[in-house]
Image: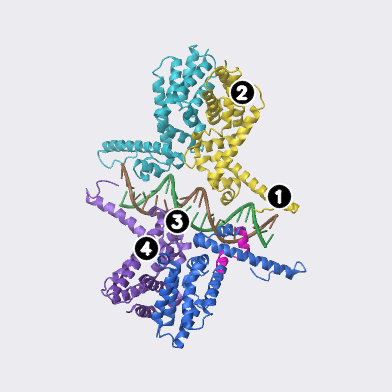
Chain colours: A yellow, B cyan, C purple, D blue, E brown, F green
Amino acid sequence: MNESEGKAKTPNEKSRKEKHSFIAEARREQIIEAAIQTLDEIGYVKASLSQIAKRAGISTALISYHFSDKNDLMNQLLMKLLERFTSYILGKVRQEEAPERKLDTFIMASLAYQGTHHARNTALIEIIFNARTPDNIPYYKLGDDDEDQIMYELQQILRDGQEKGIFGTFHVEVMANVIQGAIGEYMMNSNITSKVELETYSDELIDIVEKAIKV
Amino acid sequence: MNESEGKAKTPNEKSRKEKHSFIAEARREQIIEAAIQTLDEIGYVKASLSQIAKRAGISTALISYHFSDKNDLMNQLLMKLLERFTSYILGKVRQEEAPERKLDTFIMASLAYQGTHHARNTALIEIIFNARTPDNIPYYKLGDDDEDQIMYELQQILRDGQEKGIFGTFHVEVMANVIQGAIGEYMMNSNITSKVELETYSDELIDIVEKAIKV
Amino acid sequence: MNESEGKAKTPNEKSRKEKHSFIAEARREQIIEAAIQTLDEIGYVKASLSQIAKRAGISTALISYHFSDKNDLMNQLLMKLLERFTSYILGKVRQEEAPERKLDTFIMASLAYQGTHHARNTALIEIIFNARTPDNIPYYKLGDDDEDQIMYELQQILRDGQEKGIFGTFHVEVMANVIQGAIGEYMMNSNITSKVELETYSDELIDIVEKAIKV
Amino acid sequence: MNESEGKAKTPNEKSRKEKHSFIAEARREQIIEAAIQTLDEIGYVKASLSQIAKRAGISTALISYHFSDKNDLMNQLLMKLLERFTSYILGKVRQEEAPERKLDTFIMASLAYQGTHHARNTALIEIIFNARTPDNIPYYKLGDDDEDQIMYELQQILRDGQEKGIFGTFHVEVMANVIQGAIGEYMMNSNITSKVELETYSDELIDIVEKAIKV
DNA sequence: CATGAATGAGCATTCATTCAT
DNA sequence: AATGAATGAATGCTCATTCAT
């Protein structure tokens, strides 16, 4: 707002501005956390601003103050959730070198996320399957080709393995989709979750995939 | 709310009741069809009773008359959709004898349903991922063991194949889940749908599964 | 809604439909009257749906039920008020034959309306000077050339008088505007209203106009 | 709220106060200008404090700091606008000596103001027709006898002319009102504005008035 | 069986205002 | 003097539901 920003005439001028941004950022974070909790507890359909505000211990007006829109809040939340999920998975996967190790890690990390970040994952699912773009297209139908780094990474691993002759021949996109589907199904369906241990499922899935991709 | 509500005002109570039931049944059917159309067109979140009524060409009050609740309507709709889907798949699968044929048919029929009954399938997905039980549990987390005949049938096929020595050893529940997940992913994610033809996906998936289950 | 309307299969079928429309029409009328009262009492800025509903003794939702919009309500109200005002003035004016009598009647009737229909007139002023079109143009700037029958009639009287040689030469549009302004000023400004009697004002205005238009 | 609020914290209280007053006065001026612009652009109903603040490039809190109330702001704005308008008209009128010249000048200056100070005039109209006193009386109904120097001056001109035998006999208050109405009508109604040139209207109005007041 | 009429509860959002800094 | 943060109240509006007819 002021063209002489960055000059920091006085030491506390800068800190004051930083504090302001800091408070605002903290609030936004808090609201987003409350939104995650709300989505987890009562689902997208019932997740009104007042429900979110209640969980954050603030007024609904304050949400409107920090986010231009309910849509804005949901979009920023979706981005944050995807970001966190993506960086969690990629962080683990990229520590590995060999394609077969990368693949195993991918599967294990993806499944583990559900256990370690249950609320986040539920919130993610709730948004993806309920929210729609302004053009009324559900996010789950979008598949956001460009943005979905996870899917891109998985396909890269598979292609890399094929090129190195470690994996056999198969339709990469279909295979990636099958793996994603198997992971997603475990994440969402608590029927299988309650009957098969995460580790068992992980091991068995890796087993199945290995059989399917081997040379 | 209760089906035995008649107070016998007239002597020909029975015939009247039958007629009433018949008309009522037809109306319920009509409302449910309109609900499917509504869910397909505008999604669960926006699918208000008035939107459904508009598509059915009736008043919203009439929906409230025939269903005790919006929840009741959605539950009945869900059941009907599951029933139809189930009987479609089982109808095809049970025409086959050999486990490997049954399995292939199961996969192909499941995937084909999306193409042949698009609106129904979208409606099904919209309900499963948006509606919640009175106890606030999302349907997608339920997985309803007892009612999910589809899953039961798939697992039966796999077990049958194993017993007959046609399939190798693998964790039946995990394998069934993987297959279900692969099918579901293709149904929901239009990203893969637009990039891989139904038949290709079907063939490749069968291929993958065969490799994974073979002795 | 039904193509067999007007056939009136049974006597009470028709009457039922008529009754429904009648009730709805009566409600709309009641709401519009409440809106007039509200505008008169608290002005356009504060005239919220709940204030109108309070005066009508109904819920705000019922206003939304009978009018598609607040804008819709205000537009219909504006039309009704203009219509009533116009028909009142024109009804009186058209009973006269001679241009000079028509002109006198026009002035007297316009001024009298303020006295006899005070609330309506205030409501009219409040809407015209406060409401705006969707394009954000105030109604008072619109001047609604085509619709303003009153202004058209006044100009016709003046032209007719000129053609018949009863009135002299003057700029018709300016003269009509001056007359309208003089009437409007008396209607709105309660300062002059409290100091000069309606009849005095009427007589004097007629006098002034006569001097200005005479041959 | 009170101008003698200083608590004499520092010795050079007076100079500080003066500086403060000066800055404060400048801010108030700035806010008032922004308010004029806002009223002109979007009208009274939509002229929220945040809209005004946006146009002033300041925060809404600062408006609340300098004006006790939104009402206070609007009142002070109204006074300022009336003051400016009054001094503009009176400045021109008082340069003339003869009543007939004064009258012509009054009319021309009043009409010219719309052209030369369009935004101010629109803002003036918006406030007068939308704002209300704490007692809920619209300003347009007030006519504020004591403060309205314009109307007083006009009536003085007319009386002076009569006393000097230049004007004939007529009801001064009504005549003044007619002139005011004719001017106001042209100012507000863009229908006439677009059809009749300012100069034409001015000439014709003077002509009409001259005929009406001549001996 | 079917509807129009009606409502209370809830929605997202904006507003004028206050307060700590 | 000035601002960002925060709120309670109010707005227009939609919704599922009820009820008399």
Disc 4 on helix, strand or loop? loop
Q: Which residue is nearer to you in this view: A89 or C130? A: C130
How far apart marks 2 and 4 lie (CA) works out to 77 Å
Labels 2 & 3 near each other (Cβ < 8 A):
no
Hey, what amino acid is under mark 2?
Answer: Asp
Horizontal relation, residue D133 to residue C142: left or right: right
Magenta residues, dominant SS class: helix
Q: Which percent across, then down, holds residue B188?
A: 48, 31
Q: Which percent across, then down, holds residue D149?
A: 52, 77
Hey, what amino acid is under mark 3?
Answer: Asp
| Discs 1, 3: same chain | no
Q: Residues within 10 Å of mark 3 (few under 14, many from 20)?
A: few
Q: Which residue is nearer to you in this view: A100 or B16? A: A100
The residue labelled by disc 1 is A6
Residue at left offset 23%, top offset 50%: C6
Q: Which residue is nearer to you in this view: F17 or D126? A: D126
Q: Which residues are magenta?
A: D59-75
The residue labelled by disc 3 is C135
Hey, what amino acid is under mark 1?
Answer: Gly
Q: Which mark is residue C145?
A: 4
